[in-house]
Amino acid sequence: MQQRDVDIAIIGAGSAGLSAWHAANKYTDNVVLIEEGEYGTTCARVGCMPSKLLIAAAERAHQVRDAAGFGVEVENVTIDGCAVMARVKHERDGFVDSVLTSMQRIDEVKRLEGHARFIDAHTLAVGEHSRVRARNIIIATGSRPTWPGIFEGAGDRLIVNDDIFDWDDLPESVAVFGPGIIGLELGQALHRLGVRIRMFGIGGSLGPFQDATLRDYADQTFKAEFYLDPDAEVESIEREGDQVVVTFLERDTGQRLTEHFDYLLAATGRRPNVDKLALENAGLTLDDKGIPSFNRFTLQCLDASGEPSHVFIAGDADQELPLLHEAINEGRIAGDNAGRYPDCRVTQRNVALAIVFTDPQIATLGPSRGELEQRYGGHGCLAVGEVTFDKQGRAITIRENQGMLRLYAEHGSGQFLGAELFGPRIEHMAHLLAWALEQKLSVSRMLEMPFYHPVLEEGLRSALHDLNAKLRKGPGIIEHCMECGPGD
Ligand SMILES: Cc1cc2nc3c(=O)[nH]c(=O)nc-3n(C[C@H](O)[C@H](O)[C@H](O)COP(=O)(O)OP(=O)(O)OC[C@H]3O[C@@H](n4cnc5c(N)ncnc54)[C@H](O)[C@@H]3O)c2cc1C
Ligand SMILES: NC(=O)c1ccc[n+]([C@@H]2O[C@H](COP(=O)([O-])OP(=O)(O)OC[C@H]3O[C@@H](n4cnc5c(N)ncnc54)[C@H](O)[C@@H]3O)[C@@H](O)[C@H]2O)c1
């Protein structure tokens, strides 16, 4: 049994762990990075990057098929599933390689391979081979997919996102369970690549939407493209030969259908990897899901008496905002504070920003609609402005005139509070709005910003006009805005 004494031990060499490692190394070179699985990060291996590669192929297929709408005839569009997957895997391997190359800068003696668990508040066991005693510990263990027991009926035809990126060819059919972020992104991409899909949800929830108006709009939009039932009645899931047999009531007809699929994709949420850390030995306060309670500005976990401890948590492991940029920011804050401990600094956190790479794209920024309702709704202080893209000029020119924006602001101050967005190329507009939110701009001030013509952001300007009118700080757009160009 190897015994190590270190200043800082980091559990997990994912995006949060690597970011923590770089920050902590500015304070001490006695840091150890512990990893139980493959190096390369979830983001590069099975998350953000391969999913966006698959989506990019699907977008191209969709554009080619849609070309006829512009008078451009493309005949015999075929999808070569093997070529699609070969590109996904080739580019994915490139992203993983770049992570592995940067990891080579970490001295081998500073890495430990094996599963880490707490022996006591300052001691970790790593596999059966090492014990690490650390002044500070950073938990950066990420998350993993989770699914209900009924899916087990699918046997080894039950897959998660990781499995898709191992395929050599595209299958004929997939039953997608969970119209959340992963389900919508991957399900729509598979559909556009010619895979027969049905998408089943539970309780009506769809993507990250909290705004019911927007959720209904998006539901109708996606439903027009592929079979989607966010509140599905699935009666059974069974295995038959090499296939999964799903019996369900069809959304519009209520008819009982039994269909065969090659796979069942479970996209029903992720759980943080904190359940196998023996946290009961760490002397921390745990919440009702077994996740350490922590301060989001220092990333410090609370000890059993509720005081800031020497243990930190970052990335998907804390489940607060399971997104890549948050994992990196949190890793940096945790690494920095572990290095400074006990003189930990409170760090400014960015406004929440999340983008879903469906078509139309989805984005949320600022506090959720639920939080805003709680803070402002009951007092009649929340104003909502909206616009649809149906008649928006630029969106019509590119045949992407589907979508709706819902923007929120505070009555009185007129301050912009956040938004839920669904529309063409929303990733860019979401950044503009997140930056405006960071700057604490009022809606009137945002309307003073330059808007080019003809661009999708003119749709945003219309939503801002509507919001400003709801705030009673300016006129709404009654008909077409005379100051604007056509199709604002
Ligand atoms: C399909 C998919 C698509 C996504 N797309 C996006 C996107 O477009 N944009 C975006 O912002 N986010 C996206 N995400 C989310 C993003 O990938 C995660 O938020 C991010 O990768 C989390 O990083 P992390 O460091 O917390 O976890 P990870 O990168 O998973 O690292 C955790 C590491 O800890 C290790 N570990 C766990 N337990 C132990 C232990 N006990 N001992 C030792 N090691 C351990 C694991 O093996 C793992 O390597 C996506 C996720 C998925 C699944
Ligand atoms: N573009 C991005 O930034 C991106 C992309 C992918 C993943 N992610 C991250 O990964 C996280 C996890 O994504 P996810 O899609 O797995 O989780 P999610 O929470 O977004 O969605 C899970 C969905 O599954 C549904 N569901 C739950 N149980 C079900 C059941 N029994 N049958 C049918 N549906 C069921 C839920 O109602 C929900 O709609 C996200 O929260 C996000 O932070 C981000």
Image (tube, rainbow, N blue to C red):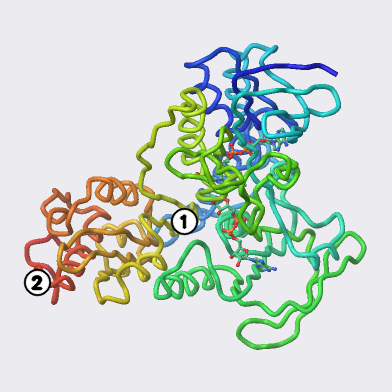
Please tell me which residue is depicted at 59% across the width and 27% down the height of the picture.
Answer: 136
How far across and down, in percent of the image, does residue 288 sit?
Answer: 63, 59
Name the secondary structure under disc 2.
loop
**Residue 191 figure quarter:** bottom right
Residue 76 in view in this figure: no
Q: Pick whichever of labels 1 and 2 is earlier in the sequence.
A: 1
Which residue is the site of mark 2? Answer: 475
What label does residue 73 carry, if any? Answer: 1
Looking at the image, residue 13 lies above or below residue 448: above
Across and down, in percent, residue 175 comes to 72, 64
Where residue 62 sits: x, y (%)?
51, 55
Residue drawn at (46%, 32%), measured in percent from left and top?
333
Residue type, mark 2 in image: Pro
- In this view of the protein, which residue sits in the foreground, 194 or 188? 188
Quarter of the figure that contains the N terminus? top right
Residue 90 versus residue 173 in the image, above or below = above
- Determine the secondary structure under disc 1: loop
Q: Is mark 2 within 8 Å of ligand 2?
A: no
